[in-house]
Amino acid sequence: MATTLLETCRIQPPVGGAAAELELPLSFFDVLWLHFHPIRRLLFYEYPCSESHFSETLIPKFKESLSLTLKHYLPVAANLLYPINTDDQKPLLRYAAGDAVSMKIAVSGRDFDELVGNHPRDADQFYDFVPEIPPVTEDSDHKIVPVFALQVTLFPGRGICIGFSNHHTLGDARSIVGFMWAWASIAKFGGEEEFLKKQGEFLPIFDRSVIHDPLGVDGIFWNAMRNIPFKSSSFPLPTNRVRSTYTLRQSDIEKLKDSVLAKKPDLVHVSSFVVTASYVWTTLLKSGDAVGEEVDDDVFEFFIFTVDVRGRTNPPMPLNYFGNCLGGSMAKIEHTNLVGDEGFVIAAEAIALDIKNRVNNKDEVLKGVENWMSDSEKFVGMRAVGVSGSPKFDLCDADFGLGRARKLEVVSIDGEKYSISLCKSSGSEGGLEIGLALPKERMEAFAAIFANGL
């Protein structure tokens, strides 16, 4: 059952193949995430392989291709420099020659088929495969914070897990998934020619000047954040949770859309995301009632999700911009309305309207951005459900020569009270997979209500 660490190494961009140094100021989109926990993901691949083939063939290929990929994605090998004196300096990302990505190599005796199942599984066991970002160090002026780490784990004769953790200031889902796709392509084809042929004109750009910030929002956000002590992250163990995956097939999603439109025929933007989010949100709240969670009827429930605003702003930002570029969207509804018979439709209407009026409106999507930090203080202690991941960025498509990933697990949702992960279904065309980590009794209640509602 044990997982054994075989090697820890540091992978640098190729010598002479990359810029000697790169410094990037944090935009206001980045500053928002300074004190957020790292994002931790696991990709599981069915790939029967011996330990000797793994060590002698695959690992050298992974290392070489990672080095080549870092040439195009220097911030991944960079450090976040967090100033000791926060009055005089701002944080920034800096890559200097010699900086590298930490990569661990491991072999595990755990049951691969158990791990990639959809049924409730002990959440703690997944941390065997999650790389910890190396510890923070200091010089006279800064805390030096690595922003990315990798672990590749072999399950002899069954498969491979590629785990990766990133500090959110490094980039959002589009950026991190783009890096993983690039690494996978270079690993699969044994070089960067195929990657450059497909992505040459869309190589990542890091220039922060593409972000229009006439109000100096980065400074406003930093003033709000700089007095919060910067803390190193740690795994939230023990989690006291089980991890499960639920699938909404395309037919389920169409049925949910039909049920919304039957009662709200004029509602626009009744998308797969809207009905999936609404169904999971209301099911989660009903499962709380089912296990005796006491909530006043008039308490507000919040559903919060981020949106990639690269193409939604005026002027638009380039889609290949690497960093954070996320706006927020929110639905706010009283508890009693969400757990009632019409709760699903009420939730869907609220989320769809916010997407229509704010997310898809270039004049509204960043309106009042200078107040995001001060407004967020009003929501401290609120009852909220969040979303991690997006079906638009299909991580399971990262093929390192191992085929399509069998399973994606977003382990970092364990660090939040209630959060769901969302991705394309690997086993159901047009379907969506929802990942949850909950206490065992709560998960059993959720599973029963989820199945009954379909």
Image (cartoon, rainbow, N blue to C red):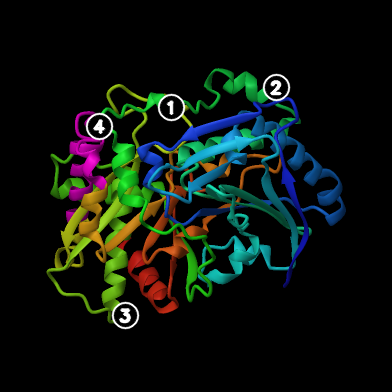
Crowding at label 4, few (<14), some or many (≥20) Cα neighbours within 10 Å? few
Instruction: For mark 3, give the secondary structure.
Output: loop
**Who's the residue at 36% across and 70% down the image?**
446
Look at the image and tell me whether residue 355 can be seen.
no
Main SS, magenta residues: helix
Left or right: where does residue 11 sit relative to residue 385?
Answer: right
**Disc 1 target residue:** 319
Specify which label sits upstream in the sequence, 2 or 3: 2
- Whether 189 is among the magenta residues is no
Q: Are marks 4 and 3 in contact (CB under 8 Å)?
A: no
Crowding at label 1, few (<14), some or many (≥20) Cα neighbours within 10 Å? some
Q: CA distance from mark 1 to mark 4?
A: 23 Å
Q: Which residues are magenta?
A: 345-372
Quarter of the figure with the N terminus: bottom right
Q: Amino acid at mark 2?
A: Glu
Q: CA distance from mark 2 to mark 1?
A: 22 Å
